[in-house]
Image (cartoon, grey):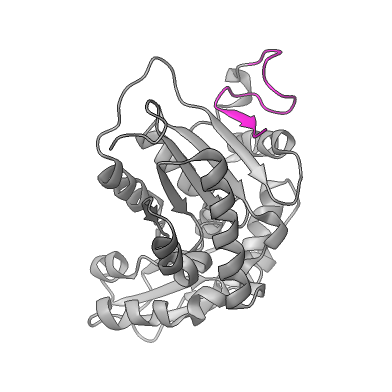
């Protein structure tokens, strides 16, 4: 695919907060020579609290602004709630390709041995007709339990920022996803991109082992399908971040980089003792791929 910039491709990755970084790490690993713009609409977080018309209008407006200013070659909507509501409108309004994030029900049901699958998402995502249609179309003989977690996305953001989140609070959010009706749940769809940020704790707190399905690898494959094989460059691409709340990207991404040394490996965020430092990088950012957007 020919870049709109004539040279290096640019991918806009959009989420309501920092959950989209779980998608970013997979896409960036697949296309290391691409420039990324990460847009976090944290001023609107959590999206599940917004009425559908307001959310749709908000996302279309933001994408329009950044399409005008940055001319990306592809947009990834790294948010299940936004994807299930606004993807059709985005594809009608803009000519560039979009990759959405929807509950991975089809592969989950195909992989389940016990035929007991749970979809763990925000209350908004599990309430969508779109999600229920996926179950009707792809569940087959699997019994699918929808679980709306009210606070888990916020816990993921807070945990990433270094706040202490009690095990009991996380356990309460995920408990309904574990069903034992003679056959135990063996597969859980993580239907919110924030949830993989907590994957180690989810595994630790699970009452029995299950397969947690993260949609990010499939999204990275879809990006490659749409853009074609990635082209090598002389140096890795850059990543700029914009937070709609106005908070500083540098300090926030610095927190993420430090978090990667505590059990979450985000590709593109090296351990601190390997960080590249220098006066050209903004304070709080210790990796050359990351800089705050101007």
In this rendered view, identify the residue nearer to me: 292 or 180.
292
Observer able to see residue 261 = yes
- Residue 116 is inside the magenta segment: no
Residue 279 shown left or right of residue 98 in the figure: right
Identify the residue at image location x=54%, y=58%: 195
Identify the residue at image location x=43%, y=56%: 94
83 in relation to 15, above or below: below
Residue 4 shown left or right of residue 207 in the figure: left
Task: Report the quarter where the N terminus lies.
Answer: top left
The quadrant in which residue 157 appears is bottom right
Q: Position of residue 20 (x, y in %)?
A: 53, 51
244 in relation to 290, above or below: below
Q: Position of residue 224 (x, y in %)?
A: 29, 42
**Most distant residue in the bottom direction:** 181
Identify the residue at image location x=70%, y=40%: 252
276 in relation to 244, above or below: above
58 in relation to 228, above or below: below
In this rendered view, identify the residue nearer to me: 253 or 230.
230
- Decide whether the magenta segment is chiefly helix, strand or loop: loop
Identify the residue at image location x=56%, y=57%: 194
Task: Report the quarter where the C terminus lies.
Answer: top right
In this rendered view, identify the residue nearer to me: 127 or 152.
127
Residue range corresponding to the magenta coloring: 277-294
Q: Position of residue 29 (x, y in %)?
A: 40, 34
- Residue 282 is inside the magenta segment: yes
């Amino acid at each position: 695919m020919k870049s709109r910039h004539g040279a290096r491709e640019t991918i806009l990755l959009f989420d309501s907060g920092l959950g989209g970084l779980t998608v970013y790490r997979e896409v960036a690993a697949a296309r290391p020579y691409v420039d990324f713009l990460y847009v976090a609409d944290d001023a609107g977080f959590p999206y599940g609290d917004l009425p559908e018309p307001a959310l749709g209008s908000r996302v279309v407006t933001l994408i329009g602004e950044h399409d005008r200013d940055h001319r990306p070659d592809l947009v990834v909507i790294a948010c299940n709630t936004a994807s299930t509501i606004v993807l059709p409108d985005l594809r009608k309004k803009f000519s560039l390709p979009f990759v959405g994030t929807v509950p991975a029900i089809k592969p989950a049901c195909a992989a389940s041995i016990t035929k007991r699958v749970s979809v763990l998402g925000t209350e908004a995502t599990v309430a969508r007709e779109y999600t229920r249609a996926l179950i009707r179309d792809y569940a087959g003989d699997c019994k699918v339990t929808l679980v709306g977690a009210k606070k888990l996305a916020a816990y993921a953001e807070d945990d990433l920022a270094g706040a202490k989140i009690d095990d009991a609070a996380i356990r309460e959010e995920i408990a309904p996803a574990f069903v034992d009706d003679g056959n135990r749940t063996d597969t859980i769809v993580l239907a919110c991109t924030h949830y993989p940020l907590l994957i180690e704790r989810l595994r630790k707190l699970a009452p029995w082992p299950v397969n947690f399905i993260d949609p990010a690898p499939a999204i990275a494959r879809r990006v490659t399908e749409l853009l074609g094989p990635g082209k090598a460059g002389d140096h890795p691409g850059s990543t700029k971040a914009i937070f709609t709340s106005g908070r500083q990207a540098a300090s926030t991404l610095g927190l993420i980089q430090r978090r990667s040394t505590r059990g979450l490996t985000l590709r593109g965020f090296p351990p601190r003792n390997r960080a590249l430092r220098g006066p050209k990088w903004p304070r709080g950012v210790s990796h050359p791929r990351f800089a705050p957007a101007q």
